[in-house]
Image: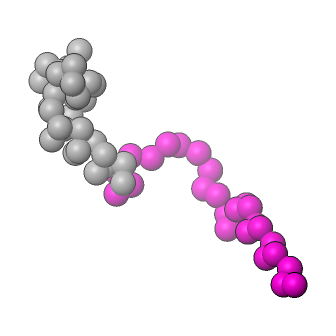
Amino acid sequence: MSCPICSKKTDPKYRPFCSKRCADVDLGRWLTGSYVIPGEAADEDERPAPPPEPPLN
């Protein structure tokens, strides 16, 4: 199996990557939105409502 970032041989410690650096590059791509899972964008209205505040006694 080869690393999906640089195509080098994978290291079992960082599988499926070859190193911590490539694992971090992949994580950075997810966090910055470079990778996305296809689907319809959620509207603000589709988010669940926050729980109600507890009554004051």
What residue sits 22% from the left and 19% below the top? Answer: 12
Residue 45 figure quarter: bottom right
Question: Does residue 53 appear to the left or right of 44 in the view shown?
Answer: right
Total numbered badges shown on the rendered structure: 0
Residue 50 lies in quadrant? bottom right
Query: What residue sits 24% from the left and 38% below the top?
Result: 23
Is the magenta region chiefly helix, strand or loop? loop
Q: Is residue 24 above or below residue 49?
A: above
In this rendered view, identify the residue nearer to me: 1 or 55. Answer: 55
Looking at the image, residue 28 lies above or below residue 16 = below
Furthest-bottom residue in view? 57
Q: Residue furthest front?
A: 57
How far from the left and from the top, in percent, is residue 21?
A: 15, 41
Residue drawn 14% across the image and 19% down it: 9
As rendered, which of 38 and 50 lies closer to the eye? 50
Q: Position of residue 41 (x, y in %)?
A: 60, 56
Q: Residue furthest left?
A: 8
In the picture shown, does residue 26 fall above or below 49?
above
Q: Is residue 4 visible?
A: yes
Where's the C terminus, which quadrant? bottom right
Q: Give the magenta range.
A: 32-57
Tell me the quadrant of the picture where the N terminus can be found: top left
Q: Inspect the magenta stretch and tell me whether residue 51 lies in it.
A: yes
Q: Is 40 covered by the magenta stretch?
A: yes
